[in-house]
Image (cartoon, grey):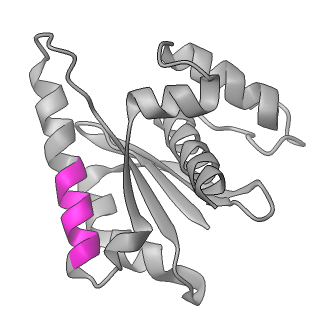
Amino acid sequence: MIIGIDPGPEESGFVTYSFNRRVLISHGTVRNENLIDDISGFAKFTGGPHFVCLEMPENFGHVVPNNVFETVWIAARIYQKLIDSGVDKSFLHRIRRTDIKQLVLGKRAGKNSDIRAAMIARYGDTLKKTEKTYKLKAHEWQAFAAAEALWLKLKEEA
């Protein structure tokens, strides 16, 4: 199982993803303080080691708004909370946005809408109740893409 997290300055999206079955188990968008409070138990649920994948912001030498620094701070707090709660570091992965693009799109450039389109092509539309991605939105798509990218990376390394 992979828990993908797309941290934001106030809320973060998450997905739990079974890489063996290639299916979404759950997804949501939560206030950061709630995620930080609950993440250690969440990462250990159902009794096995689970990979946790945090999307990490990148700097390309441009001026960035303050909310990007807040997002970095939130990601660091989530990561530290997992370590403090005893989650093995070998199961924690930080993945850069350009790596997600490379693994999901096959190129290092692209927008959120391109990533979403690639994920829909693989897993189906969010509007159909029969699809695995039913009701996925905003941060949750990016968390799902992070989980997918980690799965693809682990598969390449195996």
Q: Is residue 89 left or right of residue 110?
A: left
Residue 51 appears at what percent x and percent y?
Answer: 50, 66
Report if residue 35 lies within the magenta region: no
Residue 7 appears at what percent x and percent y?
Answer: 33, 43
Residue 76 appears at what percent x and percent y?
Answer: 18, 54
- The quarter of the image holding the N terminus is bottom right
- Which is nearer the eye, 36 or 17? 17
Who's the residue at 24% across and 49% down the image? 75
- The quarter of the image holding the C terminus is bottom right
Who's the residue at 47% across and 13% down the image? 109
Vertical arrangement, residue 141 with respect to residue 34, above or below: above
Quick one: which residue is furthest to the bottom in this view?
Answer: 47
Secondary structure mainly formed by the magenta segment: helix
Q: Quadrant of residue 91?
A: bottom left
Which stretch is magenta?
Answer: 75-83
Vertical arrangement, residue 138 with respect to residue 35, above or below: above
Vertical arrangement, residue 5 with respect to residue 110, above or below: below
Q: Is residue 66 left or right of residue 22?
A: left
- Which is nearer the eye, 115 or 126? 115
Residue 149 appears at what percent x and percent y?
Answer: 56, 42
Q: Is residue 7 left or right of residue 49?
A: left
- Which is nearer the eye, 101 or 76? 101
Q: Quadrant of residue 133?
A: top right
Report if residue 77 lies within the magenta region: yes
- Which is nearer the eye, 25 or 145? 145
Quick one: which residue is furthest to the right in this view?
Answer: 130
